[in-house]
Each structure stands twice: as C-alpha cells, then as structure tokens.
Image (cartoon, rainbow, N blue to C red):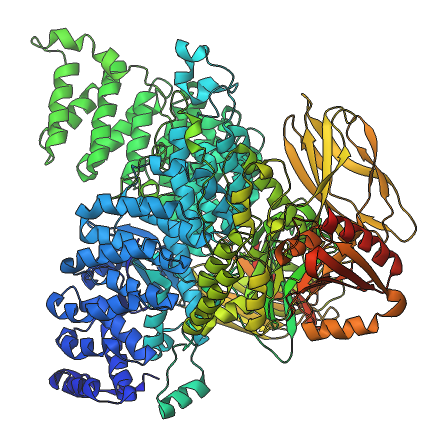
C-alpha cells in the first residue's frame, strides 16, 4: 500500500525539498495527509532526514483520522528532541487527551507525551504521571509506570518524586501493572529494596499471571531481593565446607539449624511452574533464580527446562549453552546425550557443547564420552577437531583412570595427515606427559621423530620442551634432536628458538660431554639473533651454565634451576570463575560488568526481620482489573492466615477451572462498589447513582460495554471469591466491601455474549453481598487424631463432570507429625450417585492446611455420600450430606422467560407458603441475600419491587427451580416455589422459610 | 531496555531503523559488520557484540539480521526472545518475513514496532491484540484502502489487553466453528556407522487453529499423558490443572497458535522409522571413490514414509559425483560439496538407492573424514511416540464445534554417521 514511496525516484524526493509532501499535509483531505505521512514514515524508517517537515506535520496532531494521528505521533516522537520549540505546539493536544473519558486515549496521550524528550515539559509530564498513577484504569496506570523511566532519563532530579509514584504503583494489585512498575523500579531506584517488602508476597502470588516480559523483570528483581533478606539455604547442609567457607567460622557453629523462611519458599514455589513457559527468557530467569537461591538439592529441576531450550533458535541455543557451562555439572548428567554434537551445528555451538560434555565427564560416563569424541576428531571442521583434542586432554587430567587411554588415542593422532590436528595433540600430550613422564619414554621418542615433519611452531616448541625436560629418559635421542635443531635454528620461529636454547642448556647440564659444542654453537647463533628476547636469553644462559671465574655463585645452582621438578599444569576451561555475575545476565555472558548491572548481593549473615513483609489488612478499595487466570490469587490479602486462605483458594480454582473471576471495569465497578458497600443504602441514593451511571455509560466508549457483556454470567455469589473461614468475621465490614465486587464468570455454560447491557445494569443494581459460604464439619480434630476436615459447597461448576456438585474440603493437620497419603476409599452411595474423588494428598505437614475438591453427583437427592477418609495410618468413616439448596446451580432467565416457565409449572409443581419475615429481613436486599445463601440460585430481574425472583436448575436432572418471594405489608410475604421435582420443592420451601423467618 | 533496532539484509544494507529512545546513529552497526566479517559463516556471528557505548544483540532469521541496540544490563535472552517475537509477528502479518515484504509494508511494520515496545520495554506482543490495533494487510483491504482512502488502523481500540485473557480478542464470531489441532513430532537422532542409535529423542508440538465464537473454554486430554516428559505451554494453559490432572485446560487465542511443545521422556525407546545402508569409500592413490546408499523403512507401523530428502556434505577433496538414483533426483554442488537426493516416497517393495562414483582431486591423498548423512522425512497420520489425544471438550459456549486432530511425524535433526 505504500506503493508511492518506493516508486518515487530518489532525485525527485530530495530535489523537491519535500514541497509536495508539505502541500499534501496542508490539504483538507485526510487521504492526502495519510499518503504524505506514510511516505514520511517510510523515509524515517530508512534513516532519511525529514526534520524540515516538522512544522507541517505537527499541525496535524489533532487530526481526526486515527491513522494520520498515529503516524504523526511516530514522527513527533522521532523528531521532537531536535525541534523542541515547535514540539511544544502539540502539548496541549495531549493534555486534552489525558482528560479523555476513554482510557485508551488517555493512555496513548500519556505515552506520546512522555516519549517526546523535551526538557521544558518535565513538570507537565510529572503531573500527568502522578495523575495517571491513580487512574481508574489499570491500563493507564501501566502506561504511567512505563513513563517513569522515560522521565527519569530526561531529568534525574525528579527521582524523589518518581519514587513516590513507584511506591504507589507497587502497591497496585493488578497483573497488568506489576511488570511495568517493577521495570521502572529497576531503572530508577533499584537500591530502594525497602519498597518491595510490603509487596513481596503479592508479587510472588501475581507472578504467574503477569505477562511474560514482566515476569522476567520481576523474577530478576526478586532474586536480588531474596539475596538480601533470606539466609543461605545451603549453609547448614552436610557439604557446607564446600560451598561456604564462612560456615566454618566459630560464630556460625552456634547457629540454630537452618529453617527456610516461608517467604523464601513461597518464591521458589511460585516460580517453579514458570519453567514451563514458552518464553526462553522466562525459563532462563527462573533457572537463574533457582541457581542462586534454591537449596542445592532442588536446583536440579532447572536442568530439564534448560535442555529444552536447546531446541529453540540458534542464538538462544548459544546463550543457553554458555550458561549451562557454569551451572553445577551433576544435574545435566541425565541429559548427556542432548549435548552430542551434530555435523550441522555451527562452530560456536560445537565448541560450547564440547565444553559442557567435558564438564559432565566422570568415571562412569567417560568411556561413552571418549567414544563420542573419537567421531568428532574425524570431523571436517578443523577448529572443532582442535577443540576436541583439548577436551580429551582435560578429560584425561580430570579422570586418572582414562589417562593412558587418552594418551594412546592422542598418540595415534600424531600420525594424522592434518598438521593442525597433530600440533594440537602434541601440545596436549605434552601437558599430559608432565604428570607421569617416567612411564612414557616411548611416547617421547615417538614425538622426537615428529620434529622432522611438524611445522607448527607451538607443537615444535612443545616437543623440544618435553625432550629437554625428560632428557634423562631419552639419553640417546636428545642430543641428536639438538643437533638437528641447531642446524635449522636460524629458520625457526621465536618460540621454537627459545625452546632450542632451553634444550641446549638442559642437555649441557646433564650430558655436557656430548653436547658442549652444540650448545656453544646454538648460543652463538642466538647471540646475533634479531629478537632481543632470544639474545637476552642466550646471554643469561651462557653466564649461568658455562663456568667462568665471575659467575661462580649462581652456576652452582644451574642444575637446580633448570631441572627442578615442575608441577603438572592444570588443564581447565578458559571459562572458569564467572560466579560473581548473576547467571543469565549480559555481564555474565560477556564476563565484564555492563552498565546498570546490579551486583547480586551476598547472603546476609543473619536474616533481617521477616515481619517487614507482613501487610496490615488495608481498608483500601480493591484495585480494579485484577486478573485471575492461571490459578493465582484472587484477592490480595495480608497476614499469614489470609495468605494460606489464598493458597487454598487457588487450589480450589485449579480443580474447578472455570473460575476466571474478574471484575468490572472502570466506572461500573466503582459505582457498584460504593453502592453495595452499604447494604442499607437508600433508594434515593440508588436512583441518583443509576442516573449517574447511565450517563457515564453513554460517554464511555462502547468497548467498555462490550467488555462487560463479554463476561456473560454475573454470579450473585460474590462471596464465592471468599473462602470460608473464621477470620471472615473479624472485619466483616471490610470483607463486605470486597465481596461486593462482581464475580463475573465468563465460563458459565449459559454464556450469552451479547446480552443487552441494560440487563447488566439491572444486575449491577441488584447485586448483593452475600455472606460467606457455610462450611460443615466432616471430621473433628479429636476424632481425627489431630486431622480435622471441613467441607463446604463451593458453588462453582465442577468441571470434570457438569452433573456433579463441587465439594471443597479443607484438611487441617493439627497434630505434631505429618500426615501422608490422604485419600478416599470404600465409597458407599445410594444407587445412581457417583463420586469423583479428590486427588490423593501425598503429604500434609504438621500445622499446615490443604484444600481439595471432589465432585459428587447426588442425583438430586439429599442422601449422604459415605466414604472412608484414609491417611497412611488411619481410616475414618465420614459422610457428606448436602442441604437441598446446594443441589442446584443458578441460571439466568429474563422476566418473561421466568413467567413463561412458571406458567408451565403450576398445580402439583407449585408450593406456596405464607410467611412472616424476620424483622431484620424486610428489605429487598436482605431477602435476596438470605435466599441466595440458602440455595444456589440466581436473581431474576423483576419490574416490581415487591417481588424477588430467583431461578436455578438442579444439578443432575436440570429441572428448573423457580422461587418467588412476594412481600406485603408488615413483613408478611408469600413464598412460592415452582419445581418439577416435588421433593426438592418441599425441602427447599422449608429451608428458605427458615432462612427468611429467623 | 531495547534502544534501537536495525534490520540488515544479507548484502549488509541497513534497510530499516527504529528508535525507541534517543536516536542512535547507524554507524553503530559498523561493529556488527566487523564481527560479521570475522565470522566464517553467518551462523557464527556472536549473538552479543560489545561496543564502547552499546551492546548489539542480534538474531538471524530469513537471511535478515535483526540487530537490537542495548545500552545497559538486560538479560540477553529477553532481547533475543523479543526479536524472535518480532519476526514471528511479521511472518504472521505478511505471510513471509523477507526484505521485500518488510519494505512493501514499511508503514505497518513501523506501526507494529511502535506498539510492541514502549520506551524499549515490551508492551503488546500478543498477536491477537496487535491484530486489533493494526489490521494485517490483505489484497482486498489494500485495494479498498486505495480506493476509499481508509486505513489499516483499527477504529476500535482493543479490549483484549484489558481483559482476563489478554491473548484473546473479544467479540469473535464465526459461522463455522472449528478447532483443529496438529500433533507434530520430530525425531532427533544420531545413528552411528553400524546402524545403532547413539541418541534419539522425540520433540513434539501441538499447533492449534481455533476458530470459535465467543469465549470457549477448552479441555484437551490425552490417552497417555505420561509419555510427556517435559512440556512448555502457551500462556493460556492452566498450569495447576495440568499438574493435578494432566489435562490441558485453556481459553484459546483466536486463530493459529502453538498450544504446547513437549519432549518425550528419553527412557522410552524411540522408534527409528528408516534405516540406511551405506558404503562410502575412498581408496588411497586412486582418484575415484565409491558411493552406495540404500534406504529402507523400519518401525513405521505400516504408514508410508514420504518426502524423504537425503543430504550430505562430501569431503572437500571430492570434485564431482556421478551417481545413479533408483528413484527421485539428486544434485551435487561442486562448490559447497553438498549432495542432496530428493527421494520422495519410500516403496518397501523396491527400496530406493543411490549408487555411483565420486571423482577426487588427482594426486591428493584420500580424505580421512567420512561424510555424515542428514535425512528429512514425513510420516502422515502417526505420532511416533504413540501420543494420542483422548478428547476435546468445550465449555462456556452452546454451539457444537467441529473438531479435528491430525498427527504427523517428521525427522528433526536426524543424522547418520558413516
């Protein structure tokens, strides 16, 4: 579509000075403007300078056409820095945009405003960021987080103010914001680790639902955090002397046995699933986290994931391999074969794989590795062959058993046709021989013969050194070699010459009779060499070994000097000792500190106070837009107890799967919150709000409505997002506030995408906070010998089988010992009933709590399900009996549908009861609440405010259950239940009656 | 994080540049060209090149270098992974990711890059969100746009980014609701001279094409999930559910995506679908070498082995090859010494073979290395690991979708040493 751009001759473009473009930009037609902007952007893309068009372009910043506008933004961000004064013309447009009712326009205005690097507008930016940081929309807040580092780089003096904003945004509870704000934190104030304390647990719990890029940043930051706050988990291990020399200090000896901080554990546990991310960067981030933070015994889990990464793109492979080299070798052992080299691998990968293979070699696998190396030696890639020979040498030094085998193999290579191979072998053999020279004089002889053929200087030098060093083992050959060398001395390379001099000196000392003249000759040649090193060496040696009157003192020791026993070299990888950089970082890869690298701190000697991470229950309004998808937290709460609850909750979610609860967007949630905050809210207030809301709806973008509608099913049991437990009562009021949020469950089978949003409004008004789910005792802790079990009906669809009622069980181990293998056995059921057992709980440590979910198909009866609950030691007979209200699931009906259905369920199917309502239960709100608590039904909209209607279907047979409560004066009311199943109807009447009258 | 991006083609021209912060002069690429010259092959350019003020991190895809300029510490994989995501997005948008395609769509490319990064930090990388922001060009739309002057930029701002499931756009509607899953497995193997397996592993992926209305919630279960040893998921898959029940539960993105990649545990014996009989010899002193290759099926469970392609890098000393294939065609490139033989389908009754002689440089000594043989192949309707999808269920929507599962086995890095 950019046809114009490339067909235009370059000459035309430049010579016209963009006059044509200016004209097009000035025209009234959007299409011409667009065309001009497209050409300009194409020029920018190719690096052409179009800054002279700035005035013409900037005029169009307020253009109505979205694409023109976008392209103008692109242009502006590129050139504003160069044309600061003119750029100011556009600012007012963005300022207007910041006030736009549409969140996306607000966000994009902020984005561009913060991207134009013009110093004068710093105060405006600061203001905009501050405002956006408390915006209703999480998307705008995210943009604000992005803008922070931009402003910081423009004017570092704003740091203090920006930190305030960061602190505020860190407290944000949405996954959308989390990644971006941590990024800002890392760029602006990575040293302010104290800001993280309060948010640590929240970040850990949100992590799994944050987008991939945010995950990487958060994980890296948390690694650093954990290093400052927790103790080294490997401190008291059996192998402490290996890993931590400090552990031997006397002070340390007194230390109590190490217990991992629960927060440390939380981090490890919550990051582990991310090893299965599709994003290599995330996997690597988790790997480094485990590498730096986990107890040695647990680090192994990262091996599998890292090996998987080897399969991805080439540069990823290079990078992962170069990280694998440093990671403890043992854990890759099972994956040895994944590092085998293919002839098609590029050289850099081959060399890296070789490195890993060498590190992995040990007594048990060395024979396989050597066999593999043998095939590599035949490769066509000679650099690779040389690297392989070195690798063999390293294996041989590390593993004594195979030294002879390796040596023999290398000696065979000496007859290879390729000189490079031979040379490399010689060098490696030299090093190996140094370890046990006496056994290998025949190899030395063999090598002596090679001097005739080998031309590679390094190899020649090595051979000469060997012969000199071990001349006593080859007394006959050595002088002969020297003779040959003396002949060719002038033509040798410098390193070879030096070794010839060395050889001559050593021979002179051991066998002066035969070699005296030769040595003199060599030294004379060296005396006149071009290289001063060689001349110096010759002079020095002559003084030392040839006795004269002056040099008596030292020459006595000449033999000791030259023929001292030299320690064998240690062959090691050139890549050792990079431990001080954080694994997976740029600095680590380059082995040099990159700008902005944050040093990974050492573990503290004593753990800082862990209570700093405790958060008080805040009275604040829950953030909107918290996203729960992959089983992470619903509500962020504080305190240990809440935390555990939270965990339970996530587990529950996992098994129910259909529980993407989400909240309302923007304005709606706000109003619904305030609305339901107070259950006795007056009708008048309500009306006002209704009006307000409606206007708001009109104003706000249609998208929002669409979005809301998408969340098709509005569950009335907001309370479901609240697991049952005692602390609920403690701060009832606060709870209510949170509970009142809509629980939009978009996975319900009754999805109805495009329900008119009036319905939504209706629901929003009538939504009521209901109390927590009632929980029942299954096993008391006394009868259960420390194990207590409570269950409740979670009212979530049970996904493996839609005909089952989900029963959520909470196991608490109050005993002092662990309970193992919790499972069900011997289920006794009435005919027709079925049970889906909960997965076995392998371990319930003392004092811990676990939740599990099972499904029971009660066949629409209130018969109990009896079964045995087994632990590894005991069996307990238990039973679950459902109240009739739990045997149904809510359905959504419109008023008309309801009436129609009711009409069909008359006569025998209708049960009517006259009741007198409880004094506290005379307003609509509390009626709704009580009915919904008693039975799992949903509210049906109703025109009259004297009637409350509810609908549901029984779980197994899907029979409709319709409930109507018609109120009259003085608390009198009529309860009508229409249900095909008369038994259910009768029982339900009793239950609801009870609920409404007491 | 990412400061700038330069796209460089095979001949070393910078044909696109994009800056997210202050402009970095394109002369920074000189360091890259230097490193490129030093590397013998394009693959050997180091992924990270330090320069005095910046670091260059590059990936090579489709013969285009994507060079990102970094100023400070950042996990290199973060950048590499992002660059790959950029390439994938281009491919998704334009069908191919070539220099020509990028140049033709330079405005869309620019708009995409603008959306994908903000201040160098990734903003929107999910293709579903991007497609709502910027509509991919199609022939029809290009024509309509030319006539009416309308644009590719979405009028509606996307909602996906704000929703529970950021990878799925809202308001999806299809008249035919269908969900297709392709289970594709690749065998990576090294076979030694004698025909025994040195290493063999199976890597598999499940690619999905889901076109379903609304917000469907799918569960996919396997007959034998224990086979899967190591898995990595699309972000839509619920981890915990997999851990507890070995069921894939997810709300799918709209369109094509990779649901899962997996590795089949190495404890299981891997069935090798073909065998090779080879006899490649060079004689000392003679300028002739013998080349004899026969392929045959093995452990294919009765399925046909198709699209077989054999290639081998012959030693440098080989001047030419004079061979005779029993089926298919072969080519030998005397410059790169690459021999490739397009076999096609293997007929078990009449095994394909390639026989003949190779002429060597006269007087040169015999090459001491033996070539390795790389094999590509395809087997339809079979997953070699035996993995089977048990069922696919949909919740959350009322209609009955059309479901399809396809299996395929391919050779990955399948190498035979001779």
Q: Can you give x and y, in whole percent of width and height, for residue A538 in the image?
A: 14, 25
| For residue A197, above or below residue A882 | above
Which quadrant would the C terminus of chain B be assigned to in this image?
bottom right
Most foreground residue, A537 or A726: A726
Horizontal side, residue B288 vs residue A958: left or right: left
Most foreground residue, A595 or B190: A595
Horizontal side, residue A363 vs residue A27: left or right: right
Residue under the image location 24 percent in, 12 percent down: A559
Horizontal side, residue A435 vs residue A237: left or right: left
Residue at the far left in the pictured view? A550
Question: In which quarter of the view is residue A141 placed?
Answer: bottom left
| For residue A804, above or below residue A693 | above
Q: Can you give x and y, in whole percent of width and height, for residue B120 in the image?
A: 31, 57
Most foreground residue, B3 or A184: A184
Residue A45 seen anywhere in this rendered image of the structure: no
Residue under the image location 83 percent in, 73 percent down: A904
Q: Can you give x and y, in whole percent of width and height, for residue A77 in the image?
A: 23, 66
Residue A949 seen anywhere in this rendered image of the structure: yes
Residue under the image location 52 percent in, 17 percent down: A257
Residue at the far right in the pictured view? A831
């Amino acid at each position: 579509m950019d046809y114009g751009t490339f067909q235009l001759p370059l000459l035309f473009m430049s010579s016209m000075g963009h006059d044509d473009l200016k004209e097009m930009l000035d025209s009234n037609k959007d299409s011409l403007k667009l065309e001009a902007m497209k050409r300009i952007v194409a020029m920018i893309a190719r690096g052409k300078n179009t800054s002279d068009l700035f005035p013409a372009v900037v005029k169009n910043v307020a253009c109505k056409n979205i694409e023109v506008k976008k392209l103008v933004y692109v242009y502006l961000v590129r050139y504003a820095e160069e044309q600061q004064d003119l750029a100011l013309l556009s600012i007012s447009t963005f300022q207007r945009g910041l006030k736009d009712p549409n969140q996306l326009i607000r966000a994009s205005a902020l984005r561009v405003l913060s991207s134009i690097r013009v110093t004068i507008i710093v105060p405006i930016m600061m203001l905009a960021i501050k405002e956006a940081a408390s915006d209703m929309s999480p998307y705008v807040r995210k943009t604000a987080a992005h803008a922070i580092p931009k402003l910081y780089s423009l004017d570092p003096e704003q740091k203090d103010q920006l930190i305030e904003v960061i602190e505020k945004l860190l407290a944000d509870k949405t996954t959308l914001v989390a990644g971006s704000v941590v990024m800002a934190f890392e760029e602006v104030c990575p040293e302010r680790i104290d800001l993280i304390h309060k948010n640590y647990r929240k970040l850990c719990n949100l992590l799994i639902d944050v987008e991939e890029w945010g995950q990487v940043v958060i994980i890296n930051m948390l690694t650093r955090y954990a290093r400052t706050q927790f103790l080294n988990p490997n401190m008291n291990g059996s192998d402490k002397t290996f890993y931590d020399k400090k552990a031997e200090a006397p002070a340390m000896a007194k230390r109590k046995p190490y217990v991992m901080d629960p927060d440390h554990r939380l981090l490890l546990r919550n990051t582990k699933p991310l090893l299965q991310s599709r994003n290599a960067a995330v996997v690597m981030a988790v790997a480094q986290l485990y590498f730096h933070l986990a107890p040695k015994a647990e680090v192994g889990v990262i091996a599998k994931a890292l090996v998987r990464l080897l399969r991805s793109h080439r540069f990823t492979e290079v990078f992962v391999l170069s990280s694998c080299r440093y990671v403890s070798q043992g854990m890759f052992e099972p994956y040895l074969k994944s590092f085998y080299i293919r002839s098609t691998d590029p050289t850099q990968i081959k060399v890296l794989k070789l490195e890993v293979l060498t590190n992995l070699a040990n007594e048990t696998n060395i024979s396989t590795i050597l066999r593999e190396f043998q095939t590599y030696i035949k490769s066509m890639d000679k650099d690779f062959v040389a690297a392989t020979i070195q690798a063999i040498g390293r294996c041989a030094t590390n593993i004594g058993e195979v030294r002879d085998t390796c040596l023999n193999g290398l000696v065979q290579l000496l007859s290879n046709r390729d000189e490079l191979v031979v040379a490399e072998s010689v060098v490696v053999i030299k090093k190996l021989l140094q370890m046990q020279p006496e056994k290998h004089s025949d190899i030395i002889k063999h090598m002596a013969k090679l001097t005739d053929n080998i031309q590679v200087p390094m190899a020649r030098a090595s051979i000469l050194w060997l012969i000199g060093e071990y001349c006593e083992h080859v007394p006959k050959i050595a002088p002969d070699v020297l003779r040959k060398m003396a002949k060719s001395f002038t033509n040798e390379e410098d390193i070879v010459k030096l070794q010839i001099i060395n050889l001559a000196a050593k021979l002179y000392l051991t066998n002066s009779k035969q070699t005296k003249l030769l040595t003199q000759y060599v030294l004379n040649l060296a005396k006149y060499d071009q290289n001063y090193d060689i001349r110096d060496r010759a002079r020095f040696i002559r003084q030392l070994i040839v006795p004269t009157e002056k040099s008596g003192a030292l020459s006595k020791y000449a033999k000791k000097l030259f023929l001292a026993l030299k320690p064998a070299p240690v062959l090691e990888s050139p890549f050792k000792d990079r431990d001080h950089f954080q694994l997976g970082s740029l600095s680590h890869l380059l082995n040099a500190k990159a700008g902005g690298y944050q040093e990974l701190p050492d573990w503290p000697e004593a753990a800082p106070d862990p209570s700093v991470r405790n958060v008080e229950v805040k009275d604040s309004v829950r953030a909107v837009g918290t996203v729960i998808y992959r089983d992470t937290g619903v509500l962020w709460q504080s305190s240990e107890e809440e935390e555990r609850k939270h965990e339970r909750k996530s587990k529950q979610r996992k098994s129910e799967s259909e529980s993407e609860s989400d909240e309302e967007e923007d304005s709606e949630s706000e109003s619904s919150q305030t609305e339901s905050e107070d259950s006795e809210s007056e009708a008048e207030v309500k009306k006002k709000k209704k009006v307000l809301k409606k206007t708001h709806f009109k104003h706000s973008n249609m998208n929002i409505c669409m979005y809301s509608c998408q969340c098709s099913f509005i569950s009335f049991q907001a309370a479901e997002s609240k697991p049952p437990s005692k602390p609920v009562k403690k701060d009832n009021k606060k709870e209510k506030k949170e509970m009142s949020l809509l629980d939009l469950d978009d996975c319900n089978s009754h999805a109805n995408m495009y329900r008119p949003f009036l319905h939504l409004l209706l629901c929003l008004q009538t939504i009521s906070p209901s109390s927590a789910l009632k929980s029942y005792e299954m096993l008391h802790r006394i009868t259960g010998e420390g194990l207590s079990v409570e269950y409740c009906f979670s009212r979530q669809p049970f996904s493996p089988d839609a005909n089952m009622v989900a029963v959520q069980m909470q196991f608490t181990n109050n005993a002092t010992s662990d309970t193992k293998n919790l499972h069900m056995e011997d289920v006794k059921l009435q005919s027709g009933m079925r049970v889906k057992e909960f997965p076995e709980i392998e371990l319930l440590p003392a004092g811990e709590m676990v939740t599990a979910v099972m499904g029971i198909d009660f066949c629409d009866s209130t018969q109990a399900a009896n079964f045995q609950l087994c632990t590894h030691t005991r069996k307990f007979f238990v039973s679950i009996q459902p109240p009739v209200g739990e045997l149904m699931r809510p359905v959504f009906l419109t008023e008309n549908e309801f009436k129609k259905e009711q009409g069909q369920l008359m006569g025998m199917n209708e049960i009517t009861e006259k009741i007198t309502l409880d004094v506290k239960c005379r307003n609509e709100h509390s009626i709704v609440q009580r009915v919904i608590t008693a039975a799992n039904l949903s509210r049906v909209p109703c025109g009259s405010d004297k009637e409350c209607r509810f609908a549901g279907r029984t779980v197994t047979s899907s029979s409709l259950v319709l409930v109507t409560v018609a109120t009259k004066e003085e608390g009198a009311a009529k309860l009508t239940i229409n249900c095909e199943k008369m038994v259910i109807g009768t029982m339900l009447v009793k239950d609801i009656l009870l609920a409404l009258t007491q | 994080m990412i400061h700038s991006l330069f796209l460089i083609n095979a001949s070393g021209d910078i044909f696109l540049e994009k800056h997210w912060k202050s402009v970095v002069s394109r002369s920074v690429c000189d360091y890259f060209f230097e490193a490129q010259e030093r590397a013998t092959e394009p693959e050997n350019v180091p992924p990270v090149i330090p320069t005095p003020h910046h670091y260059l991190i590059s990936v090579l895809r489709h013969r285009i270098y994507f060079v990102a300029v970094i100023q400070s510490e950042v996990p290199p994989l973060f950048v590499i992974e992002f660059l790959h995501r950029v390439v994938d997005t281009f491919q998704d948008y334009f069908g191919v990711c070539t220099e020509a395609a990028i140049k033709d769509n330079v405005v869309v490319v620019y708009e995409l890059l603008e959306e994908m990064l903000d201040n160098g930090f990734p903003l929107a990388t999910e293709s579903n969100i991007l497609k709502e922001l910027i509509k991919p060009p199609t022939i029809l739309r290009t024509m309509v746009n030319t006539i009416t002057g309308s644009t590719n930029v979405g009028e509606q701002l996307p909602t996906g980014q704000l929703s529970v499931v950021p990878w799925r756009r809202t308001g999806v509607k299809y008249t035919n609701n269908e969900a297709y899953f392709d289970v594709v497995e690749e065998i990576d193997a090294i076979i030694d001279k004698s025909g025994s397996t040195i290493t063999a592993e199976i890597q598999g992926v499940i690619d999905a094409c889901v076109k379903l209305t609304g917000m469907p919630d799918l569960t996919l279960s396997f007959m034998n999930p224990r086979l899967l040893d190591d898995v990595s998921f699309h972000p839509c898959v619920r981890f915990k559910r997999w851990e507890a029940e070995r069921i894939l539960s997810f709300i799918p993105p709209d369109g094509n995506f990779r649901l899962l990649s997996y590795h089949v545990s190495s404890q299981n014996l891997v069935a090798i679908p073909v065998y090779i009989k080879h006899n490649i010899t060079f004689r000392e002193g003679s300028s002739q070498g013998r080349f004899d290759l026969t392929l045959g099926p093995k452990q294919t469970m009765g399925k046909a082995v198709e699209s077989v392609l054999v290639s081998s890098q012959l030693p440098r000393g080989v001047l030419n090859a004079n061979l005779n294939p029993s089926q298919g065609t072969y080519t030998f490139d005397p410059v790169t010494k690459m021999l490739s033989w397009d076999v096609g389908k293997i007929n078990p009754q009449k095994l394909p073979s390639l026989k003949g002689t190779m002429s060597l440089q006269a007087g040169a000594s015999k090459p001491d290395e033996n070539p390795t043989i790389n094999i590509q192949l395809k087997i339809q309707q079979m997953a070699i690991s035996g993995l089977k999808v048990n069922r696919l269920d949909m919740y959350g929507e009322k209609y009955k979708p059309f479901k399809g599962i396809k299996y395929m086995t391919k050779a990955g890095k399948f190498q035979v040493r001779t």
